[in-house]
Amino acid sequence: GAVVSQHPSRVICKSGTSVKIECRSLDFQATTMFWYRQFPKQSLMLMATSNEGSKATYEQGVEKDKFLINHASLTLSTLTVTSAHPEDSSFYICSARSGTSGLGGTDTQYFGPGTRLTVL
Amino acid sequence: QKEVEQNSGPLSVPEGAIASLNCTYSDRGSQSFFWYRQYSGKSPELIMFIYSNGDKEDGRFTAQLNKASQYVSLLIRDSQPSDSATYLCAPESGYALNFGKGTSLLVTP
């Protein structure tokens, strides 16, 4: 249980284009999903918290107009990187928060496999 | 600023030994603490969590928590080469996780 998928796993695009990344919780409903970004040899940095049916909460320094997040259902959240530039190249990882799967009652975040974005 | 400090390593241990990974955190409001393992180029995978002071064992892994000292650790017994990865400490604040930079563990055959 507690499987989170992400699509695509890898994308290469030209500067100025927009890229959409999907995050799905496959076997549980996630009222809260999170989007992280990780640069090489750096820690995961939380970009935003996404709650189903409401606007995402962005971390300080993350441009909400550049990184559009939609959490339309309890199993799907999407991140759209608009007008991507080379500095947006990174490893984008989503996670979904589960309160019912497995581990003794404490809500747990399960991570998707990540999307590696390269902007040329 | 909610700081999470981990020794970046690499921590090198021989196969079969005990690996000890440490983490300190600044947010006294954190109630739950998670350990994730991340292989190079992959996303984190959950190892275990702890929320009560003391020790919690799960197979070869033992998490230890001392909230008064704001300290959490992970012990890996009988370390295997497949345990070589970066280990991320993540105290939970509200619904969010604050990640340390991780400790790189290398288990040598």
Image (spheres, rainbow, N blue to C red):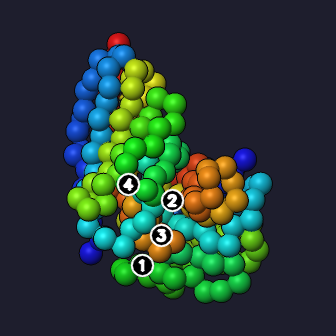
Instruction: Give the numbered dot on residue A92.
Output: 2
SS state under label 2: strand
How far apart are the two marked residues, 4 and 1, measured between alpha carbons? 30 Å
Considering the image in quadrants, where does the C terminus of chain B appear?
Answer: top left
Q: Which residue occupies 22% across, 46% down?
A: B7
Image quarter for residue A105? Answer: bottom right
Q: Amino acid at mark 4?
A: Asn
How far apart are the two marked residues, 3 and 2, measured between alpha carbons? 16 Å
Considering the image in quadrants, where does the N terminus of chain B appear?
Answer: bottom left
Chain for mark 4? B
Q: Which residue occupies 36% across, 73% down?
A: B29
**Camera sees residue A16:** no
SS state under label 4: loop
How many residues crowd around disc 1 within 10 Å: few (fewer than 14), some, or many (20 or more)?
A: few
SS state under label 3: strand
Are discs 1 and 3 less than 8 Å apart at CB? no
Q: Which one is in front, B63 or B15?
A: B63
> Which residue position is annotated with label 1?
A59
> Which residue position is annotated with label 3?
B96
